Amino acid sequence: MKKTALITGASKGIGKELALIFAQNNINLVLVARSREILSEFKEHLETNYSISVLVVVKDLCTASSAEELFSEIKDNHIEIDYLINNAGFGDYGTFADTSWERYEKMISLNVTTLTHLSHLFITDWKGRKPGRILNIASTAAFQPGPMMAVYFATKAFVLNLSEALDQELKNDNITITTLCPGPTHTSFGEESKMNASDVVKNVKIATAKDVATLGYVSMMKGKTTVIHGSINKVAPFAVRFMPRKWVTKLSERVMRRS
Ligand SMILES: NC(=O)c1ccc[n+]([C@@H]2O[C@H](COP(=O)([O-])OP(=O)(O)OC[C@H]3O[C@@H](n4cnc5c(N)ncnc54)[C@H](OP(=O)(O)O)[C@@H]3O)[C@@H](O)[C@H]2O)c1
């Protein structure tokens, strides 16, 4: 029987590339994002070019009830999810005080609350009944505090810590949690997060969304725990283990204030 993957943030960027890889591997899809037209066109493209079926769910995942609503919609359609890809997320470059509370509230809801809620709904549904795999998209931002993007970095640290803990907790339950940590990647994220307007990502090697998605897919299928994309991106997460945290935060600020 065909398997099914649920991908949040599947209308563009890394999520869209992940959807293409799942389609190429004959896996049915549930695609979630806010952009109805983009998702409908993408569904048509996928169903025309691959022998899979695609359900589109147009939803703002920043709202408190969104995870529960999405789960119910999947159950109402009698779909069994085998792979949950928590990919939707956004950041915002600037000082803590210069960004509105409303923006932070949405960021925490999307990057943290909905990701945790969806993980809880599916793990509870799978445990003791069927195997399942989760791919959570964190970031290299997860490994240190990030002045100028303090909330975003903190949300990604949450994702990394939650995912590693759950992967360990579920070792005997046939459920794996893989955390993918991309560095700067060529998607809409740079514009959305205002990072393109700063110098933070200038002269930095930018990965393609396809390469990042491929690493995520392969690693999740192997049941790996944490993967960082790109050899340069692995240096900082390794080095911070040997430095006093104060130095780490100061160095991080120096990099993040380049604007
Ligand atoms: N690009 C990078 O440099 C980079 C680096 C490290 C980690 N990441 C992480 O990678 C993940 C994917 O980002 P990306 O780079 O592919 O960014 P992207 O191109 O901006 O894509 C973000 C996706 O999330 C969806 N989304 C945003 N807000 C949403 C909401 N409220 N409800 C439902 N869907 C929503 C967007 O679709 P709609 O607009 O249609 O809703 C879109 O499909 C994020 O978690 C990001 O933090 C990115």
Image (cartoon, helix red, strand yellow):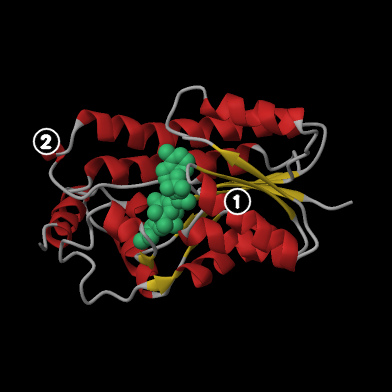
- In-image side of 197 versus 233 (left or right): left
Say what amino acid the circle numbered 2 marks. Ala
* Residue situated furthest top in the rendering: 65
- The quarter of the picture where residue 19 lies is bottom right
The residue sitting at 69% across, 43% down in the picture is 171
Look at the picture and state if 95 lies above or below 123. below
- In-image side of 156 versus 201 (left or right): right
Q: Which residue is mark 1?
A: 40
Neighbours of disc 1 within 10 Å: few (<14), some (14-19), many (20+): some
Q: Which residue is mark 2?
A: 97
Q: Nearer the viewer, residue 156 or 73?
A: 73
Asked if residue 7 shows in the view, the reply is yes
Look at the picture and state if 110 lies above or below 63. below
Q: CA distance from mark 1 to mark 2?
A: 38 Å
Check disc 1 and report its element: helix, strand or loop: helix
Look at the picture and state if 194 lies above or below 150. below
Say what amino acid the circle numbered 1 marks. Ser
The residue sitting at 50% across, 67% down in the picture is 212
Q: Position of residue 192 (x, y in %)?
A: 30, 52
Check disc 2 and report its element: helix, strand or loop: helix
